[in-house]
Image (cartoon, rainbow, N blue to C red):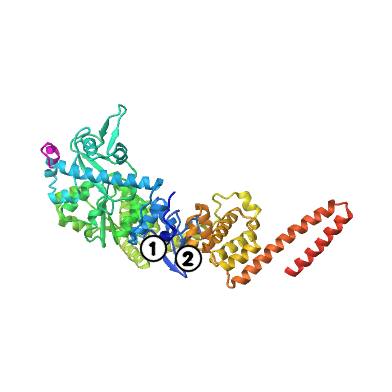
Amino acid sequence: MARYSDEIIDDVRQSNDIVDVISQYVRLKRSGRNYFGLCPFHNEKSPSFSVSPEKQIFHCFGCGVGGNVFTFLTKIEGINFVEAVQLLAERANIQLPTLENNVDSAKEALKAKVYKVNEFTAKYYHENLYRPESKMAQEYIKKRKLSNETLKSFQIGFSGKFDELYKELKKQGFEDREILESGLVNKNERGQYIDRYRNRLMFPICDVRGRVIAFGGRVLDDTKPKYINSPENIVYSKGRHLYGLNVAKKYDIKKRLLIVEGYMDVVSLHQRDIHNVVASLGTALTQQQGYLLRNNTEQIILSYDSDEAGQTAKVRAMEILQNMGCDIRVLQMEGAKDPDEYVIKYGNARFQNLVDKAISVIEFKVKILRQSLDLESTNDKIKFLNEIAKLISKIDNSMEREVYIEKIAKAYDVSKEAIYAEVNKLTYREIKDEKILSKPKPVVKHIEKKEMDNVSEATKRRENTVIAILLLGDRNIYEIIKQNITIKDFKYDIDKRIAEKLYEEFENGNSNINSIIDNLSEEEQNHITMIMAEDYGIDDVEKAIDDIIQSYEKDKLNERKLEILELLENSTEENQKKELEKELNDIIIRLAKIR
């Protein structure tokens, strides 16, 4: 895979502090010299995900994943190294050179063409909306009272018949591969190219930068399915984008952002001057969409449809957003199945009032629980209060706990003391369980258990210490280590592989640890960041090296001693015995000096 030069990569790396970048995805709190948070790569209740501003690395002591700022982005965004460099370069306003004559450049060229296909198509569909033959779409637009300004803001359009778009794209000089890759056209068994969208109201989907990445098409009659959407392709992954965010960002959305289910909910609310609204592209909310929400606003209002699917989506979204530490509210809506219908029936002011009165997640869950139980029944009331205690025990903020306990005690005629007692009992139990669950476990991924069993913990610790010292990047220290410790001296396979790469880089004159990390495998990155994240108590480097060298010498002497003893046992030649006994005596003296 082609890469940018080390100088460019270093420039991008130095312009993107790892704490700042990871803070966009993970809630971090400073503890000593490092920052800690809940690992985004596995489920955990206690923070074991560490970020070092000094070393510019991250490492999770729970699941073992680790790396630098590029590694983090490739994992969290599902992109490759080159794309991570490009994303961070854009973040830092660094202009990158074009990668040429490689697979990546071919892929980038195809992506650029697909963006152009999408851009032309959005414009074509939008212009098509105003043509005389698009009367059906125009009547629908009129019925929904959508203004020309709104139609332009969202580039809403209308798709034609059979292969109209395909023919227009060919006229523009686009190749079949580029057209098919966009997902806008299908090729049937007879070799015909047919437009995916025909006689549908078209909603271009844009990324945060405003580039058209996909489309959603709505029927204007009773045809099924009601909506069809672009398949995932080279520029589009539906779980990583939010419909309407590119438009919403033109307004003030920092304080509050509504998330709804459908395109028309977004468009209809925007039409009525409610601009802080986005949709989750017809899918259950994903973590990546959660990051987009959290990075763009302080408070998220969930406003899904009132049907069963909407309620399920709401609960799923709550779980994801709560785990990310978001401030969430739930819109309570009666008299309409979705925000679009509500705002058309009752108007902007009444809808805004609903938004202002949106309830907390706890209140929502209490309401749902209340509806499922008969509080006139003693058993149901006990169950109800026990479940509420569970909900409250999960609240970190003590003031917030106090408010909810006060409310529930008054509303359901139960003493505050009784609720406190149950909450405290559950909290204590959770803390106890978390301590057990959060104990770091050895990461054995990709490492043979047999190999681990054959290498003592002391040997692993020693080898890790050698690597930790090499990672200081001091050439003089490397020369001392190289003269006394060979690659063959490393017993633990992963340490041997890492040491070999470090030796090689030092020999090539490269002591830039971050660039070395970039060239390691995933397993090696996880291991090296674990070493970097641990404290080996090396106050005096020269003394530490001397101790390690002596330790290696002692091991070699002991191994030779055992070999000699075995040879003496089997030897019958007197001269050979004398030589071996002399060597054994020398070894014993040398070992005594080391001790």
Q: Amino acid at mark 2?
A: Lys
Q: What residue span does the magenta drawing correspond to?
A: 130-137
Of residues 62 and 14, which is closer to you in this image? 14
Q: Which mark is residue 470?
A: none
Please give the name of the residue rendered at 66% of the width and 63% of the height, measured from the top-left corner: 484
Judge whether 379 appears above or below 173 on screen.
Answer: below
Of residues 430 and 583, which is closer to you in this image? 583
User: What residue is disc 2 on?
Assistant: 55
**Mark 1 secondary-structure assignment:** loop
Judge whether 411 appears above or below 171 on screen.
Answer: below
Please give the name of the residue rendered at 80% of the width and 56% of the height, measured from the top-left corner: 564
Asked if one can make out residue 374 in the rendered structure from this viewpoint, the answer is no
User: What residue is disc 1 on?
Assistant: 16
Mark 1 / mark 2, whichever is N-terminal: 1
Percent coordinates x, y for residue 326 in the rendering: 34, 59
Q: Amino acid at mark 1?
A: Asn
